[in-house]
Image: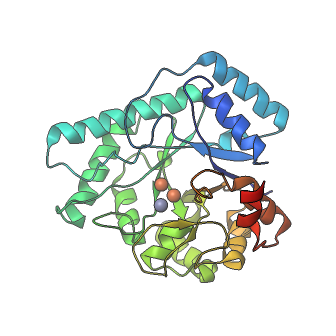
Amino acid sequence: MLYIGSHVGFKKDTQLLGSLMEALSYKSNTFMFYTGAPQNTARYPISEELTLQAFELMKKAGMDASKVIVHAPYIINLANNKEPEKFQFSVRFLQEELKRCETLGIHYIVLHPGSHVGLGTDVAIDNIAKGLNQILGTCSVTILLETMAGKGTEIGSRLEEIQKIINLVEDKEHIGVCLDTCHLNDAGYDMKEFDQFLDIFDSMIGLEKIYCVHVNDSKNPMGSHKDRHENFGFGTIGFDALLSIVYNKRLEKVPKILETPYIDREYPPYRYEIEMIREKKFDPGMIQKIKQD
Ligand code: FE
Ligand code: FE
Ligand code: ZN
């Protein structure tokens, strides 16, 4: 079975129910959201009522709630301990995010490992593991380290770095990985040879650690370290390579999430991209069609 969805909004008044309704409007059977603004840590209380309603609707729609994903705000940086207060703030905030996930009945949260900001990779990896060890151990939520493009001083653009972090984490049951195809391409991994990539991943980390795949195309060539997402099939990875990732048998149970850009910053492309994916047919006129609809 194919689990396909997109990133969706999460609004104060509608919360999980609103996110779910947005996902259903794209004909998704899974989705991912931030529990507030991705770029800040302002958060409001979770409504039990709206959460219950969302779970009822998921049941009715035949959606597997265990596949739904939260993304942690990207300002959390567990790699940087230059200022201990800031590091502790990141730890505490992530702890609270995990609690929010539990309240929302969500099992997985995607986290950017962080940026070393001049501290160097080894120190950063140590900091990240220390932070994670403060957070994990008492919670039912699993943290998924996202593979990164290697922009600036980002950690996680090499599988070796992800592997080292996981090795240092004590609560192995609650640590996993989220692949991002745009990031992997920009980091220098060939997404057109995805089975070879999975072989390497399996020997280093283990395929069973993959709980989510962000299926984005890239605006830039392999190894560019840029991190600019492109619509599905319209970038340098291309439709055929992305489609074979989506349908790869080895990741069949893993939810695939689109984080592709809005058209003209206004129109979400997800309903159209999901249709192309389900029909396994590329529509070069998709962007024009979205503008007209
Ligand atoms: Fe991300
Ligand atoms: Fe991503
Ligand atoms: Zn990205």
Q: Which of 271 and 154 is in front in this view?
A: 271
Residue 130 location, x and y as percent?
27, 47
Instruction: State left or right for residue 212 relative to residue 279.
Output: left
Quadrant of the image for the N terminus? bottom right
Image position of 21 with respect to 214: above or below: above
Give the residue displayed 48% in from the left and 20% down from the top.
45
Residue 127 location, x and y as percent?
24, 52
**Tell me, what colour scheme is on the image?**
rainbow
Give the residue displayed 62% in from the left and 63% down from the top.
215
Q: Which of 75 and 134 is in front in this view?
A: 75
Image position of 225 with respect to 254: above or below: below
Residue 202 location, x and y as percent?
55, 71
Instruction: State left or right for residue 177 relative to residue 30.
Output: left
Numbered disc total: 0
Q: Which of 76 and 137 is in front in this view?
A: 76
Give the residue displayed 73% in from the left and 35% down from the top.
21
Q: In which quarter of the image is residue 96?
A: top left
Residue 213 location, x and y as percent?
60, 60
The residue furthest top is 49
